[in-house]
Image (spheres, rainbow, N blue to C red):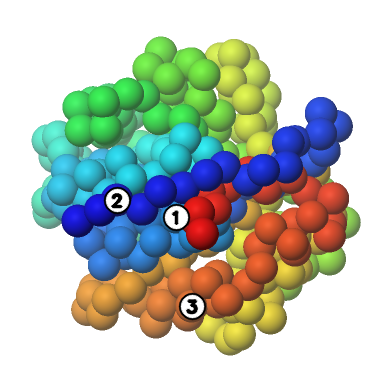
Amino acid sequence: MRERQFQAEPAPSPENAARLVICADDFGLTTAISRSIVALAGQGKLNAISCMSVCPGWKNDAILLKLLPKSVQIGLHVTLTEEEPLTAMPVMAWNGRMPASSELEKRALMRRLPLGEIRKEVAAQFDRFVDVFGRPPDFVDAHQHVHVLRGIREIIMAETARRAPKAWVRSCVDRPSAIFSRCFPVKAMINSMQSRGVRRAAANHGLVCNDSFAGFYDFSGNYQALFPQFLEKPGQFHLVMCHPGGGHHKADVIARARRDEAAALRRMPIHEMAAARGLHFEAAMPMS
């Protein structure tokens, strides 16, 4: 089958323009999700993909990423919740699966995380990413944002600095004035507060972070109507997370929201929406 050809967005980035990154999380969770994400990236609707190297489908799904241009950044979505680990974790994954995010947060607050197990698992997920994709990730974050938790953040920063020193790390911190100008501010504010100190921790390891963050909602409602709010009051490096996908995986509680997001992103003129807000959105554009 003939590969689709892409060209980069023709307009150069002004040196002082704010940068917009739209990142699709959970690549590799299922092949249907992965295919949907790659299609959207090829259509110029997003320019970053965060990959779950812990998932069994990662090796096969990663082949899809080879079709994309260099303007699409490929990152590691470190996973420490709900999936089967790559390494033995007798304390944290005593039943063969890593805990729910709420349980992990509780353990972090009580300083009862098995940091040795986590360190080995994070290293293994880096290994599997590089073994399959052939190079280090362009950025690093974590499933359900657990990379911001105390104890875990130090492990991920150190491993990123060692394995991918040019990568950036996701920060969920944003200014309260920006958060409260968008939808679902309480959810965003809680994540922002949990993330305090992440940028400083990254800087201590020679790493950088985005300086504003959006994309929170309750996985219901009209995503196309909500999305413009995610572009309000951006910083110089504005990151918007999204969770598009396809399929009907029974265990995926947000499967319907993923399909809705994918459909909305396909319809929206992302480049024009970004430009109207003074944001430079570097993404692929299909050649006519």
- Per the image, the residue denoted by label 2 is 3
Secondary element under disc 1, as helix, strand or loop, is helix
Furthest-front residue in this view: 288
From this view, report whether residue 83 is shown above or below residue 196.
below
Q: Position of residue 285 (x, y in %)?
A: 54, 53
Please give left or right for residue 209 compared with residue 148 in the image. Answer: right
Q: Determine whether label 3 and label 1 are within 8 Å by CB.
A: no
Q: Position of residue 77 (x, y in %)?
A: 39, 43
Q: Residues within 10 Å of mark 2 (few under 14, many from 20)?
A: few
- Per the image, the residue denoted by label 3 is 263
Name which residue type carries label 1: Gly
Q: Determine whether label 2 and label 3 are within 8 Å by CB.
A: no
Q: Position of residue 171 (x, y in %)?
A: 62, 40
Name which residue type carries label 2: Glu
Q: Residues within 10 Å of mark 3 (few under 14, many from 20)?
A: some
User: Which callout, 1 or 2, points to the residue nearer the camera?
Assistant: 2
Q: Residue at x 39, y 61 (%)?
A: 39
In the rendering, which numbered label is found on residue 111? none
Name which residue type carries label 3: Ala
Distance, label 1 to label 2, CA atoms, is: 11 Å
Q: Earlier in the sequence, mark 2 or mark 3?
A: 2
- Per the image, the residue denoted by label 1 is 42
Q: Residue at x 44, y 40 (%)?
A: 69
Secondary element under disc 2, as helix, strand or loop, is loop
Q: Residue at x 30, y 61 (%)?
A: 35
Q: Residue at x 46, y 30 (%)?
A: 138
Q: Residues within 10 Å of mark 1 (few under 14, many from 20)?
A: many
User: Which callout, 2 or 3, points to the residue nearer the camera?
Assistant: 2
